[in-house]
Amino acid sequence: MGSGSQLRHSANASSPANLGPEARLTEARLSEVLRFGVSRAAAWGLGLGVLGSALALGGCGGPDPARKPVDLSQGVPLGAVLAMSGNANVYGQDQNTGLRLALAELNGKGGINGKPLALKIEDSGSDEPGANAAFTLQINRGVLALIGPTLSQQAFSADPIAQRRGVPVVAPSNTATGIPEIGPFISRVSAQSSVIAPLSIAKALELHPRIRRAAVFYAQDDAYSSAETTIFQKALTARGLKPVTVQRTQLNDQDFQSQISAALQQKPDLVVLSLQAVDGGNMIRQLRELGYKGVIVVGNGMNTPNIYPICQKYCDGILIAQAYSPELRSAANTTFLRRFQASQGGAIPPQLTAQAWTALQVLAEALQRLDRRQPLQQTNLAEARKALMAELLSGTYQTPLGEIRFTPEGEVIQKDFFVAQVRMDASGKSGRFALLP
């Protein structure tokens, strides 16, 4: 995207020239951790101690940008932390698209009262140390607020850093229970699993009322999966379908034959998956290859078209609850659809892209209101961050997701939810989420 978009990645982010020597060194080492991962950085002599001291920067080790005026020299500074690499990169890529499109739309309409938004995006990888380092790097750069991280597991680790530093966070895709409760600077536009997950169970039983035996699979080393499976199991039990088996997996597993074989011995006619896109796609393919012919319900971790190349023709028919519908008739969704389809050859936008757009939109609208009442150039960074969080939670927003607002604790309040069924094309290589009535 051109310079007019004011989007910056870590490779060309603003210079740390205003930081002291110790802070510049720490920023360089943090960037090394982000690029190569903690283990390789340690092997190169950077060490985990560097990461630990970097996370403390601002408290002792370098000048705290929060005490200075908001730096508007490059635009109104916001940061995003996305999983652009690792096993969650399929989500980060969808989110990156949403942020880029929203940024172009917002700056094309004047940004923040005539000042362009300057969005810096960092790749956190798909683990907690990467998210911690990316959050710290962005905060030390002086951003007003953060969007991210991609995974709930990362959020439970990185969000407390922003909370301690008084930096607003808007989570675009963290659905696990307890995210806003991390602290008063944490919010999300992604509805929690307890609201969405039961909808797909209800639809499965509506479509297939003879279902009697449910098997459940989840990744036990993932916070999102562990939280969501609890909700799924409660929803099943409430409808008289206590799971006949619960099978545990790991995020990086690729071979599920032992778990599937154990589950199929129980003769389930419903399988419920709380997995991420890659492991979940592989699970579906192996379930079908090993002979399972029943209904499959999946959770929010598989709410992306990026599952199609993984499970291919076997994706067909799976049920999933969604917080976004491309068929929603509203001015906000029409604008989003126009931007997305113009850039993606007419494709249907995924939920994660719509949620990322929404995260940037709500921050921009809150900043516009705040700047009119309390000009940013007259406010120090710490005060601006605190005021922005209060402004964000006080608003009502017309977004691609429909109308949303926030509870005082930062939980999203959303009106519209949907259930979709994946329908693959004849080639088995592409498909769509078809909304069900």
Image (cartoon, rainbow, N blue to C red):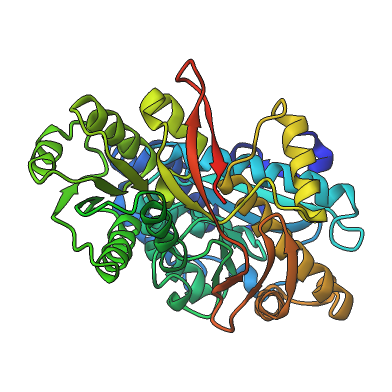
Q: Residue furthest bottom?
A: 408
Give coordinates of residue 207: x percent, y percent.
Answer: 41, 49
**Residue occupying image coordinates x 51% and y 35%:** 305
**Residue occupying image coordinates x 26% and y 63%:** 233
Visible residue check, residue 28 = no
Q: Is residue 360 left or right of residue 106?
A: left
Residue 323 figure quarter = bottom right
Give coordinates of residue 271: x percent, y percent.
Answer: 26, 46
Residue 228 figure quarter = bottom left
Label count reads 0
Give coordinates of residue 431: x percent, y percent.
Answer: 52, 28
For the residue pair 217 and 91, the one nearer the viewer reads as 217
Visible residue check, residue 156 = yes
Q: Residue furthest front?
A: 210
Give coordinates of residue 436: x percent, y percent.
Answer: 54, 48
Q: Is residue 342 left or right of residue 299?
A: right
| Quadrant (top left, top right, bottom left, bottom right) of the N terminus | top right
For the residue pair 74 and 261, the one nearer the viewer reads as 261
| Above or below: residue 340 compared with residue 374 | above
Q: Is residue 356 left or right of residue 318?
A: right
| Above or below: residue 274 compared with residue 293 | below
Q: Residue furthest top?
A: 427
Residue 342 figure quarter = top right
Q: Is residue 168 left or right of residue 49?
A: right
**Residue occupying image coordinates x 51% and y 22%:** 425
